[in-house]
Amino acid sequence: MSMLSSHIVSTSPGAPAPETAPPPANPTRRLVIVVRADPVICGHSGEARNLAEVALTRGFDDVRIVTWPMPALQAAGLPLKPLDAVLPYSPGISVERPEPVGDYKVPDGRYLGGIVGRLVELFTEGVPTTAMSLYLTPHATAVADAAYLARATGMCAPLVTVAEAVGSDITNVVRTAVAAGRFGAAARAFITYLSSDVCVAVSEYTKVLIVEAAEEVDERWGTGFANECRERVSVSYPAIDSSAYLNLDPHELERRLGERGLQRDGYVMFLSRLSRAKGVDDLINGFATSSASEVTKLAICGNGPEAMALRALAASAPCADRIVFFDDVDDAEKPYLLAGSAAYVLASKPRPEFVETFGIALVEKMLAGGGPIITCDTGGIGEAVGPHARIVPTSHPQAISQELDQIVLEMTPAERQAWVPAARDYAAKFDRTSVFDRLFALVEKGEADLAAAS
């Protein structure tokens, strides 16, 4: 073990507990995942958990999720789950929240410095390691910097790096840089991404988005990123734990719905971040004008930057008393709420800062059952749902209203359930075990390429 491994887990005050277990004394194979982990409300925090859990069954005896201290997450204004409701990880998975390095004179780099420093220590402990970053900015940057530094020490263990890109890496970073004429920022994103041994995107749509953005940079500044992205970027869909959504106890379902004041088949549901791109305003307006609103409730589950504005919009609706908000739904309760709903609506719409590049919640709904999905053919949503959803135009409350009336008022409960078997079969391909195995086939190829190059 390296002299640098002076600490194992540094967990900030206020972090969910227990979330870590002592790592093995003499690990032989390590997976490190850098991500905005729980309690952040984000499908990719769940993806990190799912990849970590499968890794324990695939020969990794030490799995580390390296993430941000709670004060950093809270200060960023990210929507968070209730801290006391975060599910524990299996023994063998350690969550690390490195403390910041430096004081107030280092305005924004202190937390990143802590993460990079801890990664260097992990990479130089003599354990063959696969390091994966979910989101390029700043997580792939942290892994790339740490890999460079670890190798520069001469003590780096065998290391393979994997970078997974999501749509906001492009819409929120690269295209903003291009629009502002900031070549350096755009180049940094692509060079960091392509410096990874394995480059993946969360959907085919995301890969197209990456290549198109690279073409913009190439055309403007004469670089050559697009061809390399076309050749090197593979698709790895988000990993979802199917078992959490299947074979739900009907008595437990009724109990949980009762605690929320809901009845099975008696509510329309939204569950995701409360942000502009999710189209919750269109859902509220569509529900308010529907005849279905007279016999069902609308349950809006989640939190986010638009929470106050959406509550105000709902309060002004004629059916305000039938619209409820739940900002404390945890991972254990989520499958039951999905399964009990008469319909699930995600009216996602493209925004400059965000495009739905997959739609993890949609797959979770398909697995859980319940009534049909209403959504928009935006970004990678089509890849997530296939033919198993009712598609409405973006920013079209009236279309949502019409679909709700048809599903709630014209279909029987049995007809609402009829869509489930085929949808569940389609969603099974996103199960975490299958996704992990496909991803690590790419990793093994990357390892072989590195060995051949050396």
Image (cartoon, rainbow, N blue to C red):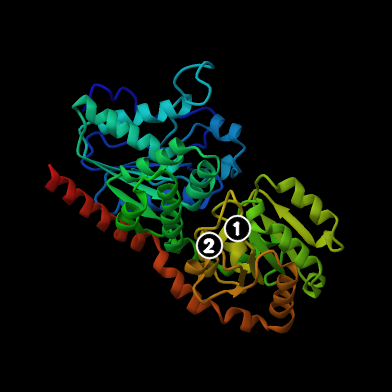
360 relative position to 162: left or right: right
Residue with the mark numbered 1: 350
371 relative position to 453: left or right: right
Marks 2 and 1, the one that precedes in the sequence:
1
Q: Pointer 2: residues within 10 angstroms few (<14), some, or many (20+)?
A: many
Q: Quadrant of the C terminus?
A: top left
Judged from the image, the secondary structure of the residue bearing numbered disc 2 is loop
x, y percentage for residue 310?
75, 52
Residue 247 seen by the camera: no
What is the distance, in whole Å, between disc 2 and disc 1 at their CAs? 8 Å
x, y percentage for residue 75?
60, 31
Residue with the mark numbered 2: 379
Judged from the image, the secondary structure of the residue bearing numbered disc 1 is loop
x, y percentage for residue 334?
58, 58
**Could you tell me if the residues under marks 2 and 1 are in contact, i.e. CB atoms within 8 Å?**
yes
Which quadrant of the structure image shows residue 31?
top left
x, y percentage for residue 307?
71, 47
Q: How many labels, in total?
A: 2
Pick the residue in front: 384 or 432. 384
Residue 33 seen by the camera: yes
Q: Tell me what residue is drawn at x 44 percent, y 29 percent.
A: 112
